[in-house]
Image: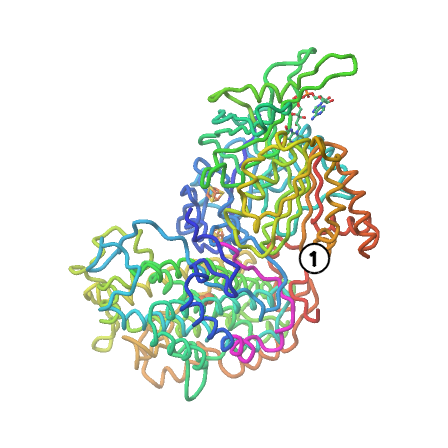
Amino acid sequence: MTLRKQHVIDPEICIRCNTCEETCPVGAVTHDDNNYVVDPEKCNFCMDCIYPCPTGAIDNWRMVERYYTLEEQFSWLELPPETVPQAGAAVAGEAGDEEAERLIAEAHAATGGRPVAPRLAPQPVVGLYGRAAPAIARVAGNYRVTAADSDNDVRHIVLDFGTTPMPLVEGQTLGIVPPGEDAEGRPHAIRLYSVSSPRDGEKRDSPHLVALTVKRVVVRQPDGQVHRGLCSNWLCDLERGAEVQVVGPFGSTFLLTDDPEADILMICTGTGSAPFRAFTERRRRTMRHAPGRLYLFFGARTPSELPYFGPLQKVPRDLLHQELVYSRLSERPREYVQDRMRARAELLAELLRRPRTHVYVCGVRGMEQGVDEAFAAITRAHGLGPWEALRGRLVEEGRYHVETW
Amino acid sequence: MSESIHVDYSTRIPNNVGLAEDARVRRALEKWHPGYLDWWMERGPDGFQQALVYLRTAVSVDPRGWAVFDFVRMPEYKWGILLAPKVEGRTIPFGRHRGEPAWQEVPGEYRAMLRRLIVIQGDTEPASVEQQRHLGKTAPSLYDLRNLFQVNVEEGRHLWAMVYLLFKYFGRDGREEAEELLRRQSGSQDAPRMLGAFNEETPDWLSFFMFTFFTDRDGKMQLEALAQSGFDPLSRTCRFMLTEEAHHMFVGETGVGRIIERTCQAMREAGIDDPTDVERVRRLGVIDLPLVQKKMNLHFSLTLDLFGSEISTNAANAFEAGLKGRFREDKIDDDHRLEHDTYPVPRVVDGEIRIEQVPALTALNCRLRDDYIRDCQGGVNRWNRIIRKYGYEFELRLPHPGFHRKIGEFRGHHVSPEGKLLDAAQWEARKGAWLPNDDDQAFVEELMATPEYRPGHYARWIAPPKSGINNKPGDFEYVKLHP
Ligand SMILES: Cc1cc2nc3c(=O)[nH]c(=O)nc-3n(C[C@H](O)[C@H](O)[C@H](O)COP(=O)(O)OP(=O)(O)OC[C@H]3O[C@@H](n4cnc5c(N)ncnc54)[C@H](O)[C@@H]3O)c2cc1C
Ligand code: SF4
Ligand code: SF4
Ligand SMILES: [Fe+2]
Ligand SMILES: [Fe+2]
């Protein structure tokens, strides 16, 4: 049995104001004298209609085996009872899929409390596609975003979903199903990748074009053998036009706040920069002059190994304050993200004091430790009390987020 | 998507119209701003200016721009100037200029007509804030209090929207009109608001819900008609305002619906089978359905007067000029010029009400009114559904369009809610049964005298809403009265 998600309108709450019909970019909403309804064949879950609806009637979802037809929906006096409990936007967890749920939970483990979405975050769709019926995308672009001569091969991979809806908001991840089976003949586990394009797509108005930032994993093991990461290598070698099976979207807490007055502090290493590219693009496209600013602390070994080094130089400074930190520059002592944080203690203390600051930490597992220590030193020195207490409050308010792997 | 969907916060007045680069208009607005704030403090919500209210503010004009809810003090609300995105290549959709590129500047020959349309629309916006200024003191819940204030700040923003057009496109006259908008006052003897219904009191919450259901819906119809305008800045302004207007309609429809729900519930609990047993029902501390019907009759008829005379050359001129269209003009399949069409209009002729065919151009007000009535009927059907759900036979009905009218074809005639012509004596004898009388008003005001400010609690005469604003839980404190 395959279940599909259907977007429906609660006729008991709807006041037939026509806002949704006016808003829907694909003409999926229509009405008769009785009800406003959503055409399941047209709706692509872009969520554009959700916010302007004055009643919330349109924020309803059903998992169904067979779509309710327009005629059935026109005849409703109330929503039919839910036969399948798990219904899209309302799933309890972050993924609506056990395998992904576990990966996300591990990635958020170092948050310092149960992760909470920012108060003004958009409502994400999660678990739209599972292994049973993954979305199929084609590679529309694949190019390197670290210097060609560096050891670190990080790729910007653009996936084209064509007409398959893939609603995303900044901070979410997608799962990739690597082809083939493992030694025991089981399908490979899915791998998660943070989406590095904003919700309206790699280019403006192109939600079907979704970017990932993938590092080619090549690990020299203690026995001298080299392990080439299965999924990352497969992805990094894909040619234009190649087919990729995608599950998701996942993640309902590590999300960019929509609050234009919020200052956003982003701390990352390596491909942890992926979601922050999406954050920056979103702000640049929609809130260029928002009173809140973006602050990026970004660590790599050298500039040539820092993903997106070139494009970052072109981001206006009044939009994004940049602290690029290198640990392997020749004539220089090693500097890590946490060292630079201590050096900018004044700035960070000021940001932590502001009631709307949101902090995001993303990158390799273990980096959160250095970050925590730096914050602890800063809060101690600046009279902000013990870091753990402050962090606890920030987490509860949806203002502190960690995603590491 | 064009740049202009994004709101610029670098100036004092959030906007997506490039105010930062338009020094003349920016300065004019900045000069007007203090007077506006004075108006808001003096004639806006009385006694709640320091409260923190959970309000929705548009941060951009794309759909997601509506997602921002936050606690704000009303005087600090971000009244901005927001226009719907420009549609490239838009043409004038109707009238004698149909098919020509939409105007980006005021066409000289229509300047006066256009200014008048904008001023009339603009005058209604602050008026309703004034009419509703005392309601906070009798709010049935913090949820309803918040909804009232959301409506109020948005009406304030609608005033900004119209004032921007006046400053931007009408030079000195525009500036003077903008001052006048702050000077006229609802119900005032010497400087009343321009339209009758906006000088009536909104004395209680049932009236408030009826007002937002019926009178804000007139606003919606007018905005829909102006959204079709060939003058593109007006069209874009109105399209954006419609999204806010929808919320006002929601407040009205669900407000009345919740009152009906509570009444039916209470009647069932008390074993009352006859909903017209007014005295018994009132003893339960809920509002009887016949009184709901009377308030409906009142607000419906007052609002129909806002559409102006059924037969009007002004309306014809505005249409021919391409300034004000019909409801959803873009969805109508005809020649959009109407020179040879007719439209049925009910009129009083020889002592009876007859339907007469009149030239469609002069009947445009009547047509908009008919579209309005259809729109109202949808909501009334939902109310009746609630009554039926509780097993009562009672049915709420919109009165005949000729009932209790002061403007247009029925002016000077007496018409019953069923549409029968009456003489003056018959009318005097019956009107207390059709419109709220002094006893009714005294009952409502006493019933609603004490506010309910405890989070999650509701006055006994109204049911809680089916879901919270922005999915907030039932006991959410929508207004922090003493922050
Ligand atoms: C929430 C989340 C978001 C993620 N976002 C991204 C992203 O945006 N970009 C991205 O490239 N990856 C991201 N990852 C990691 C990604 O999911 C895969 O784990 C990674 O690509 C390795 O998969 P693989 O199949 O290539 O390696 P596998 O064949 O699974 O081999 C993994 C093994 O290699 C070793 N290994 C893996 N990575 C490294 C490393 N970086 N350094 C040293 N040893 C390593 C480990 O010991 C591990 O046992 C994310 C993971 C999570 C959970
Ligand atoms: S926007 Fe909401 S209330 Fe309005 S018609 Fe659509 S679903 Fe109904
Ligand atoms: S989710 Fe998007 S496509 Fe679906 S009805 Fe809403 S606006 Fe239309
Ligand atoms: Fe308004
Ligand atoms: Fe309104």
Task: Using residue A376 as the reference point, say whether residue A39 is left or right of it.
Answer: left
Please say if B248 is above or below A96: below
Left or right: where does residue B97 sit relative to residue B296?
left
SS assignment at label 1: loop
Relative vertical location of residue A51 with respect to residue B130 in this rendering, above or below: above
x then y, percent, for residue B379: 45, 60
Q: Magenta includes A327?
A: no
**In this picture, residue A342 sits left or right of residue B50:** right
Q: Which residue carries the number 1 mark?
A: A354
User: Which sits in the foreground, A109 or A9?
Assistant: A109
Residue B39: within the magenta? yes
Indicate the position of residue B90 as horizontal and vertical percent values: 30, 52
State the residue in front, B138 or B322: B322
Subunit that carries the residue with mark 1:
A
What is the three-letter code of the residue carrying label 1?
Arg
Stretch of the chain drawn in magenta: B37-60
Q: Is residue B471 above or below residue A182?
A: below
- Determine the residue positioned at 67% across, 49% down: A358
Question: Hey, which residue is sitting farthest bottom in the picture?
Answer: B190
Residue A220 location, x and y as percent?
73, 17
In the image, residue B36 lies at what x, y percent? 50, 75
